[in-house]
């Protein structure tokens, strides 16, 4: 029987043997690489008119062209960059807000917990779409940064609740009591005692927030509430629907962005299941 290493090597050992995690990475990594090198292989302007309109996939245009002669592959590659950027910014902000509120509420308890829990419930039931419509109508700001900010500030409640529950279970542990009796400040206890013991859980939470941010951004772009400039996978679907690509038989215009969004989000969720099996000893397979 093969000996199983311990510590960090143990996690790496099971990670390299987890089929779900490896399958998710096999899908996600090539898309990340394509997004990183997009300007090198697809040019700097994805909206440039480069070929005959409505051309099917060919050696010169791998994903064909739009009704206006724009290269679909160039738009897809650049759209991946924006999609990943919104996912990282929106998911990162949501994770940060969720951690701060979840840690503080779970550790302090009492009135602080009640106030923060009330705030979480308010944001949870907030009609996010209506808020975005108001922002667009009165501010007129539609950029990737604003979109990521909006997603981050409306997607954190479930993460805050989950982190709060985990913090509740850890705050009564002996090592936390010892730190408290030693006079260690609250924030140092949270960051140095509680958070490190939840690192794997926090990482998986960020992956879910990352995938959720991508889905929300794609949905907003598709219904016309995303950035009006540039290109993203959701905006590609919006343009394809607006110009009747399906009815005209231009399948190469809407299939790549739709498949890209599905692949990214699906890979992230499969990776999350794999990471759960890696980090949880009860779910590991030798």
Image (tube, rainbow, N blue to C red):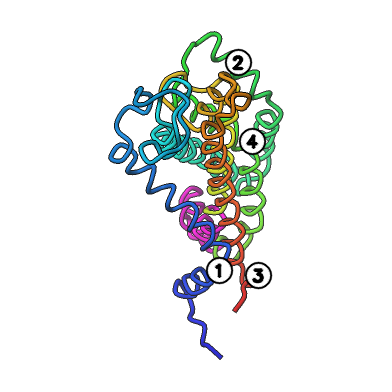
Question: In whole angstroms, how far apart are the C-alphas of marks 1 and 4?
Answer: 38 Å
Q: Are marks 2 and 4 in contact (CB under 8 Å)?
A: no
* Label 1 Cα crowd, 10 Å radius (few <14 / some 14-19 / many 20+): many
Q: Is residue 186 magenta?
A: yes
User: Looking at the rendered structure, which numbered label has been put on residue 272?
Assistant: none
User: Would you name the residue on which mark 4 appears?
Assistant: 116
Residue at 48% x, 41% y: name it.
Answer: 92
Q: Depth check: give the residue in front, 199 or 149.
A: 149
Res. 110 image quadrant: top right
Label 2 or label 4, whichever comes before in sequence order: 4
Q: Where residue 262 sits in the image (x, y, percent)? A: 58, 43
Q: CA distance from mark 2 to mark 3?
A: 44 Å
Between label 1 and label 3, give the one nearer the viewer. Answer: 1
The residue carrying mark 2 is 133
Q: Quadrant of the N terminus?
A: bottom right
Q: Nearer the viewer, residue 174 or 135?
A: 135
Q: Is residue 135 magenta-colored?
A: no
Q: Residue 283: which disc?
A: 3
Q: Quadrant of residue 171?
A: bottom right
The answer for how far apart the CA atoms under marks 4 and 3 are is 33 Å
Q: Residues within 10 Å of mark 3 (few under 14, many from 20)?
A: few
């Amino acid at each position: 029987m093969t000996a199983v290493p311990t510590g960090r090597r143990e996690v790496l050992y099971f990670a390299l043997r987890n089929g779900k995690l490896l399958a998710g990475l096999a899908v996600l990594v090539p898309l990340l690489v394509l997004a990183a090198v997009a300007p090198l292989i697809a040019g700097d302007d994805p909206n440039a008119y480069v070929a005959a309109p409505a051309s099917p996939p060919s050696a010169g245009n791998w994903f064909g062209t739009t009704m206006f002669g724009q290269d679909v592959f160039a738009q897809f590659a650049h759209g991946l960059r924006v999609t990943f950027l919104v996912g990282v910014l929106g998911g990162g902000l949501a994770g940060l807000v969720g951690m701060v509120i979840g840690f503080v509420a779970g550790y302090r308890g009492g009135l602080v917990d009640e106030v923060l829990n009330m705030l979480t419930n308010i944001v949870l039931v907030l009609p996010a779409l209506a808020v975005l419509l108001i922002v667009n109508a009165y501010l007129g700001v539609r950029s990737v940064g604003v979109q990521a900010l909006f997603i981050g500030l409306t997607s954190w409640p479930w993460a805050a609740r989950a982190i709060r529950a985990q913090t509740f279970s850890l705050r009564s542990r002996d090592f936390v009591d010892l730190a408290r009796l030693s006079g260690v400040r609250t924030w140092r206890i949270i960051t140095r005692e509680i958070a490190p013991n939840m690192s794997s859980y926090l990482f998986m939470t960020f992956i879910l927030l990352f995938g959720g941010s991508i889905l929300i951004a794609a949905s907003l772009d598709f219904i016309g509430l995303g950035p009006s400039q540039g290109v993203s996978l959701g905006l590609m679907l919006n343009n394809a629907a607006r110009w009747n690509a399906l009815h005209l038989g231009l399948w190469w215009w809407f299939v790549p962005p739709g498949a890209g969004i599905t692949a990214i989000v699906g890979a992230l969720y499969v990776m999350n299941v794999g990471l759960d099996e890696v980090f949880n000893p009860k779910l590991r397979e030798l």
